[in-house]
Image (spheres, coloured by chain):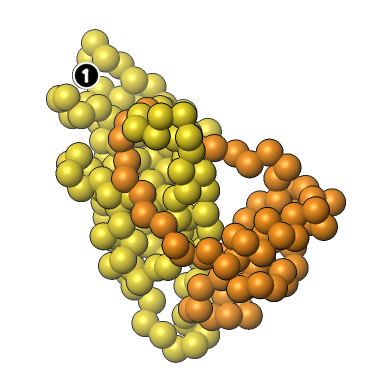
Amino acid sequence: MALEKELETYKREFEHLREHEGKFVLIKDDRVLDWYDTYRDALKAGYEKFGLVPFMVKQILSVEPVHTFSREIICRI
Amino acid sequence: MPHLTLTTSPGAGPILDVLIGVSEPLRKIMKTQGAAVPKPVSIRVLLDTGASGTCVDLATLSALGLVPTGTALIHTVSTTGTPVPAALYDVSLALVHPGQQFVRWFDAVPVMGASLAAQGIQGLVGRDILAQCLLVYDGQAGTFTLAF
């Protein structure tokens, strides 16, 4: 699964991260790098630090949003 | 407000072409590194008010050389009550008025990667993008208008 390690890091660190509710966290492997006000700023920092190597940007939210689709889509992760 | 009015595709709904490219943060770092920046590609998308987010076909994302930079939980008609994880990719998305220069450019948008080609489309523009537009669906006239 893509970004499996980063997701595990997010879950593990969530209790610390939740004080930054709404911000966008940048995670690489098992490291939380920083958090940012906007999605764009977090992406920018990720590409500047890691270039074209995978990293994860995720909004810090206490209630994980679920996207809904009224038609069938097949996603891969 | 720039707008376009197009004919609704029979049996398919409000379909139009949009440009998908690498996000602006990625484009900048590729230029800095001297890497070739892939040109945006034109894809056919359905304006889908039943989709909370925007999706792009995996073949398009692969052609742009993109890898996931996030994850999201999704519900579809087949997930039967249990959300499943999906990969998110950061892209730029441009709504273009055909024949004119009106462009609305979203420079960094998270989209879900999905297999959509079997449905005759390469993407769904969901309510995350539509929330910043005006969509009028005129079923009797067989047209739709998108203002952006």
Question: Chain under label 1?
Answer: B
Residue drawn at the location 60% of the way across and 60% of the way down: A7
Q: Where is residue B138 in the image (x, y as percent from the top left)?
A: 30, 16
Q: Where is residue B1 in the image (x, y as percent from the top left)?
A: 48, 34
The answer to whether residue B106 is left or right of residue B61 is right
Q: Position of residue B119 (x, y in %)?
A: 20, 39
Residue placed furthest toward the top: B140
In the rendered image, is residue A56 in sight?
yes
Residue drawn at the location 48% of the way across and 60% of the way down: B90
Q: In this view, does B33 lie above or below A37?
A: below
Along the line of sight, which residue is nearer the eye, A37 or B2?
Answer: A37
Q: How many marks?
A: 1
Q: Element under label 1?
A: loop
Along the line of sight, which residue is nearer the eye, B95 or B1?
Answer: B95
Q: Is residue B7 above or below residue B38?
A: above
The answer to whether residue A66 is left or right of residue B91 is right
Q: Position of residue A62 (x, y in %)?
A: 73, 42
The residue labelled by disc 1 is: B142
Residue drawn at the location 25% of the way across and 27% of the way down: B13
Q: Give the image quarter of residue B97.
A: top left
Instruction: Tell me the shade of chain B.
Output: yellow
Q: How packed is label 1: few (under 14 Cα within 10 Å), some, or many (20 or more)?
A: some
Instruction: Tell me the shade of chain A.
Output: orange
In the rendered image, is residue A57 in sight?
no
Residue placed furthest toward the left: B10
The three-letter amino acid code for the residue at tag 1 is: Gly
Residue drawn at the location 38% of the way across and 46% of the way down: B55
Q: Give the image quarter of residue A11.
A: bottom right
